[in-house]
Image (cartoon, helix red, strand yellow):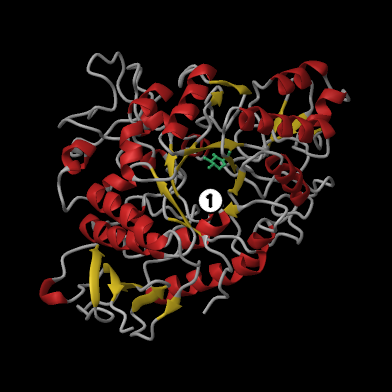
Amino acid sequence: MATPLPHTVTQSGQWWRDAVIYQVYVRSFADANGDGVGDLAGVRERLPYLAGLGVDALWFTPWYASPQADAGYDVADYRAIDPLFGDLAEAEAFIAEAHQRGLKVIIDVVPNHVSDQHAWFREAVAAGPGSPQRERFWFRPGRGDLPPNDWQSVFGGPAWTRLADGEWYLHLFAPEQPDLNWNSPDVAAEHQDVLRFWFDRGADGVRIDSATMPAKDPELADFDPANPPLPHPYIDRDAVHDIYRAWRAVANAYDPPRALIGEVWLDKPDRLAMYLRPDEMHTAFNFDYLNCTWDPKALRHVIDATLEAHAPVDAPATWVLSNHDVTRHVTRYGRADSSYGHALRQHKTPVNLALGTRRARAALLLNLALPGSVYLYQGEELGLEEVEDIPGTHRQDPIFHRTRGLDIGRDGCRVPLPWSGTTAPYGFSPPDATAEPWLPQPADWATRTAEAQTDDPDSMLTLYRTAIRLRREHLSSIAATLEWLPTDPALLAFTRPGGFAFLANLSDQPVALPGPGEILLASGALPDGLVPPDTAVWLHTIRSN
Ligand code: NOJ
């Protein structure tokens, strides 16, 4: 049993401790101007939908001016909105309108790198070797015709690109994403200023991209990625924490304080917790949970490990199953091996979508019953699966192109949302659109649209709406604790304060409810009052006093 966190969210007023946060991947959400790419006007039109879903906050993936070499994670200007999506006035109006509807807005910041079209990088290229402008990046001479070291890009290929003047620059992602040198005081000052720019415009928090990577070993020595030295040359180095301490001070200067949310991919919960110390980030994504198989022992282990690691730093846990970088969980849970790893996407291995959907429904009830905050990725509320048959000619992810298709990449989870109608573009673009959606939508998504699901009591959308509403009623102002019930190890069963009980059946036989009580919600039918395999229930237990 994990150490209880001492306070309830209601007492503390810290919304991010138990918020349900919906990730808006802008280019695939809704296209108002008919160019085939989602935009801010499209999100604004759908604000009633988002408010009706019952979520507390929206997280926008980067909306800044960008050449879009990595779908906006190559930022050319943080103080401008990309014309693809709208303009700054629209972003400001959007934040204000979201606030009127009671929704917080979180934006994405990318400290590790900028675009090669960012003014700083252009100046550095123009200024030449040895110039102070190059100090803001990692420029080095090569080793003869070879790069300065053997580091490989996360997206495939070498992590260095050579300029015409002979110097090389470091990019841990695509060549269009040069890494910043955080030893340069300009870099720290500029990012703090960018935070203030958006906090002044009402942003309630930031999601921090690739948060473990900005600090580098200045030796830039070769290493064996299969057996990296400790500390790692660029992942989770101690110096990275200085960045977030300074950011926390910026966030704390606002009333109410703004929230810092880290993309911290680390498989060591104790190292992750270091980012959540009281003077650093408020919360971080739980990727161990995302990676976990649909297996009761593994899930229970990861839940306990999460709660245990977060308790000493008094940070809330987070529960997340999908985002714009990973295979959608309806698909993952429909595979014989339901784990996730970037290195092995299991593209086109057999999938049982009916099974994956049943499990995804049960998983939603689990996520929303656990203490902490929950992240939803757009489209999961429609039960969307990974689209695996996008032709190579349409694929846009730099991972696909840089690995020459060896790694299929992330386009399959980024397909534009189906809103209405029976054929593409399913209301994603207006009827007079001049372009097709930027990625092709499957021909059989008529039943997946929001319109088709909205009045269907058994749809995924109805389950999300109902579960989020009931969570608010029953789980939002209680202590962040859970108590496992002694059950068959193939079940996940626990109670929360206030007479709430949860059970998920991961065995292959129907099982009885965990005790007497009122059934608040079930992820599927309960024939004969029993809980079938891959089904979860919420109960309000009847207390004897
Ligand atoms: C993590 C983001 O989620 C991903 O989409 C992006 O490609 C990399 N960081 C690089 O910014």
The percent coordinates of residue 452 (x first, y second) are 16, 39
Q: Residues within 10 Å of mark 1 (few under 14, many from 20)?
A: many
Q: Is residue 497 above or below residue 356?
A: below
Q: Position of residue 311 (x, y in %)?
A: 61, 68
Foreground: 408 or 197? 197
For this orientation, the residue located farthest to the front is 545
**Image point (67%, 56%), residue name:** 275
Quarter of the image with the C terminus in it: bottom left
Disc 1: which residue: 16
The residue depicted at 78 percent of the width and 32 percent of the height is 189
Of residues 7 and 4, which is closer to you in this image?
7
Give SS at disc 1: helix
x and y, in percent, of residue 36 in the image: 34, 21
- Asked if residue 122 lies left or right of residue 262, the reply is right
As displayed, is residue 222 above or below residue 111? below
Q: Quadrant of residue 246?
A: top right
Q: Is residue 200 left or right of residue 43?
A: right
Residue 160, placed above or below residue 540: above
Ligand 1's quadrant is top right
Q: Is residue 77 visible?
A: no
Q: How many marks?
A: 1
